[in-house]
């Protein structure tokens, strides 16, 4: 079974490629959110759809158990501000 992790590979050159790919992918997602909002979709609906699509893709790629282990780390990441870009609530 594959282990799902957001840790970067040990090879520093590969790590940069992974970081770059994630940055580019994030820009695509941000663009899709902006386009959806311009078309009148609620940002909450977009976020839920994006999470569902992401989890479905992770399950297809790594399987249910590895994805569940990955998801178990999310509460702590949320609480420590990993996903916070502005004022913390």
Image (cartoon, rainbow, N blue to C red):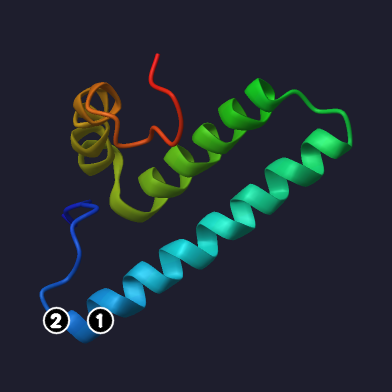
What residue is pinned by disc 1?
A: 14
Q: Quadrant of the C terminus?
A: top left
Q: Residue at x 29, y 38 (%)?
A: 64
43 up-or-down from 64: above or below: above
Task: Residue lying at the far top in this picture: please name it.
Answer: 89
Q: Percent x, y for residue 87?
A: 43, 24
Name the residue: 37% across, 44% down: 59
**Which element is circle 1 on?**
helix
Element type at mark 2: loop
Residue reaching furthest to the left: 10
Q: Residue 58 vs residue 70: left or right? A: right
Crowd around label 2: few <14 · some 14–19 · many ≥20 (10 Å) = few
Left or right: residue 2 compared with residue 40: left
Q: Residue 35 carries which label?
A: none
Residue at image position (27%, 32%) is: 71
Position of residue 60 relative to residue 78, above or below, is below
Query: Residue 10: x, y in percent?
Result: 10, 74
Q: Position of residue 67 (x, y in %)?
A: 28, 40
- From the image, tell me which residue sits under label 2: 11
- The answer to whether marks 1 and 2 mark residues whose Cβ atoms lie closer than 8 Å is yes
Q: Crowdedness of circle 1 by 10 Å Cα count: few (<14), some, many (20+)? A: few
Q: Residue 12, position in %: x, y? A: 17, 81
Residue sitting farthest toward the bottom:
13
Q: Nearer the viewer, residue 61 or 52?
A: 52
When asked about the image quadrant of residue 48, the answer is top right
Q: Residue at x 29, y 37 (%)?
A: 82
In front of the other: 81 or 68: 81
- The quadrant of the picture occupied by the N terminus is bottom left
Q: In which quarter of the image is residue 55?
A: top left
């Amino acid at each position: 079974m594959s282990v799902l992790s957001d840790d970067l590979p040990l090879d520093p050159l590969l790590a940069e490629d992974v970081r770059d790919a994630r940055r580019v992918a994030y820009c695509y997602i941000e663009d899709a959110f902006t386009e959806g909002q311009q078309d009148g979709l609620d940002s909450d609906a977009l976020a839920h759809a994006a999470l569902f699509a992401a989890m479905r893709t992770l399950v297809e790629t790594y399987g249910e158990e590895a994805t569940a282990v990955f998801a178990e780390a999310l509460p702590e990441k949320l609480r420590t501000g990993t996903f916070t870009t502005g004022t913390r609530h």
